[in-house]
Image: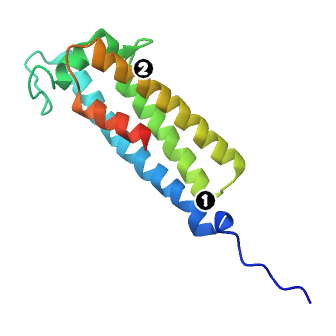
């Protein structure tokens, strides 16, 4: 009689699911950050007297970054792109949690690579082109790395 093999750690449901939980949490945090960033973007462009809570000084100032021409891509605020991207990441994370598959994993990996590339580009622009850093953007970059 053949003895049943214990499950492989890699195939264990709890082990295979934790990255999806991390991805879901990160995408929800990123979604929240992007919504706040979009509100700051809109307010800085519509209310001349507006100063956000993250306008700390000259070097750390979300308002200066929001007024920068680099805060818009293809006519859409970068924060709005972030809302879309993190909503998509949330859907893919839920897909991976509820119906784990190689396709879900491939989509998750593809999104992660796109988000890392955008972090490199936007982080480079923040560090070397725009005269201020946005702490909420930096937090979003950290989320993308996670």
Q: Quadrant of the C terminus?
A: top left
Q: Residue at x 38, y 27 (%)?
A: 80
Task: Identify the secondary structure beneath mark 1.
Answer: helix
Q: Quadrant of residue 109?
A: top right
Which residue, given by chain and number where applicable, does mark 1 sit on?
Answer: 98
Going 45% across and 12% down the picture, which residue do you hit? 74
Question: What x and y, as percent, mark residue 89?
Answer: 51, 41
Residue drawn at the location 23% of the way across and 14% of the way down? 67
Q: Secondary structure at mark 2?
A: helix
Dot 1, crowdedness within 10 Å: few (<14), some or many (≥20)? few
**Residue 134 place in picture, x, y as percent:** 23, 27
- Position of 88 relative to 40 (above/below): below
Q: Nearer the viewer, mark 1 or mark 2?
A: 2
Pointer 2: what residue? 121
- Residue at 60 percent of width and 35 percent of height: 110
In the picture, measured across the screen, residue 136 lies left or right of residue 113, that is left
**In this rendering, position of residue 75 left or right of residue 117:** left
């Amino acid at each position: 009689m053949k003895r049943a093999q214990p499950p492989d750690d890699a195939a264990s449901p709890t082990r295979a699911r934790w990255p999806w939980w991390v991805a879901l949490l990160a995408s929800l945090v990123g979604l929240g950050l992007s919504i706040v960033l979009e509100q700051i973007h809109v307010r800085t462009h519509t209310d001349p007297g507006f100063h956000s809570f993250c306008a700390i000084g000259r070097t750390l100032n979300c308002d200066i970054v929001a007024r920068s021409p680099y805060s818009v891509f293809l006519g859409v605020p970068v924060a709005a792109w972030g809302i879309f991207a993190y909503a998509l990441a949330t859907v893919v994370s839920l897909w991976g949690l509820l119906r784990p598959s190689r396709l879900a994993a491939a989509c998750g990996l593809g999104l992660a690579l796109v988000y890392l590339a955008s972090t490199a580009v936007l982080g480079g622009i923040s560090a070397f082109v725009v005269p201020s850093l946005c702490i909420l953007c930096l937090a979003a970059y950290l989320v993308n790395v996670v």
